[in-house]
Image (cartoon, helix red, strand yellow):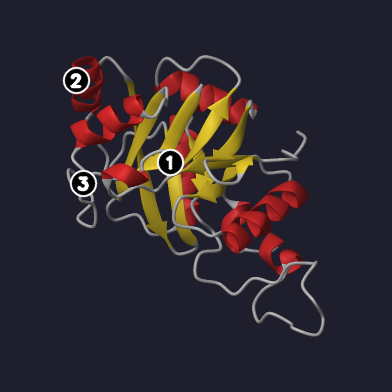
Amino acid sequence: MKIDLHTHTVYGSGCSHLEPSDLVEQAKRIGLDGVCITEHNQLWDPERIEKLGRKHNFLVIGGVEVLTDCGEILVYGLHEPVRWVRSAQVLREMVDRAGGVMVAAHPFRGLGLTLEHDSPHFPNEGIDIEEGCRLPLLGYVDAIEAFNGWAYRREWQFTLEVSKRMGLKGTGGSDTHKVLQTGVCYTIFERNIRNEQDLVTELKAGRFIPANCDYGTSPTPPKQ
C-alpha cells in the first residue's frame, strides 16, 4: 500500500493552502491508497477524520507534527492535546502510554550536509554522517523520515545513510501544503492498512520502505 504519511491542510495548519477534500481527491487521482493528515501541533477529531474518509471512500488517518526542543516529530496513535508540549522526552512518554509511534520529520532540514563521496578539494561546510547519527532527536523516535517532499537529493542521500547506520527504518511523506505536491514522497507498506491501529502496528514492525517520485524507492532499506 502507498500512503503519504505527512500532509497539511487549511483545517489545522495556517501555512497550508490545501482543503482536506482536495488533498484526498488528489491522492486518489495519483494512485495513493491513503493519506495521513499531520497538522502542526493540532490533532483532528477522530470522528471528523472518519467522516472525511467515508465521504471520499478513501483511507484517511489522523496524526500530528509536533515541534519539540529537539526538532519536529510526526506522531501516530496519540489522541491527547499536544499544543503546549515542547519536550521530546515528555512527548515520548505520552506516545508510549498511548501505544503510538514517533517519526523524526525532515531531521536535517536547513543544515549543511557533508557526504562521504564529496571531493576533499571542495569540502562542504556542515555536519557529516557521524554527526548526523548523534542528533539528539534520533534518540527519541521509532523511525526517520527519509524522503520529504521539501527536501533535495543531497538531503535524501544523507538521511538514508543515517537511517541505515542507526538501524532506523525510513518513511516517506510529501509534507504537502498545496494540491500538486501531494504524494511526491510516500511510504510503501507490505501489508494492508485499514485504520490507524494497522498503521501503528506496521510502523512498529518495520514492514515498509520510503518512496519518492523522482528518486524511486530506498535502494538499500536498513535491515531490522
- Tell which circle, 2 or 3, labels the residue nearer the N-terminal end: 3
For the residue carrying disc 1, how many other residues have a C-alpha within 10 Å: few (<14), some (14-19), or many (20+)? Answer: many
Residue corresponding to mark 1: 75
- Which of 44 and 22 lies nearest the eye of the viewer? 22
Secondary structure category for the residue under label 2: helix
> In the image, what residue occupies the spot 27% across and 52% down?
83
For the residue carrying disc 3, how many other residues have a C-alpha within 10 Å: few (<14), some (14-19), or many (20+)? Answer: some
- Tell which circle, 2 or 1, labels the residue nearer the N-terminal end: 2
Residue corresponding to mark 2: 51
Secondary structure category for the residue under label 3: loop
Q: Is residue 27 visible?
A: yes
> In the image, what residue occupies the spot 45% across and 50% down?
149
Q: In which quarter of the image is residue 217?
A: top right
Mark 3: amino acid: Gly
Q: In which quarter of the image is residue 60?
A: top left
Residue 116 is situated, as x and y percent measured from the top left of the image, at 79, 67
Which mark's residue is nearer the viewer, 2 or 1? 2
Residue 166 is situated, as x and y percent measured from the top left of the image, at 73, 50
Quadrant holding the C terminus: top right
Farthest bottom residue in view: 121
Residue corresponding to mark 3: 12
Q: Quadrant of residue 205?
A: top right
Q: In this view, does 213 lie to the left or right of 94?
A: right
Counting every numbered tag in the picture gives 3
> In the image, what residue occupies the spot 38% across and 29% down?
30
For the residue carrying disc 2, how many other residues have a C-alpha within 10 Å: few (<14), some (14-19), or many (20+)? Answer: few
Q: Do the residues labelled 3 and 1 touch (CB within 8 Å)?
A: no
Marker disc for residue 129? none
Q: Do the residues labelled 2 and 1 touch (CB within 8 Å)?
A: no
Q: In this view, does 161 lie to the left or right of 195?
A: right
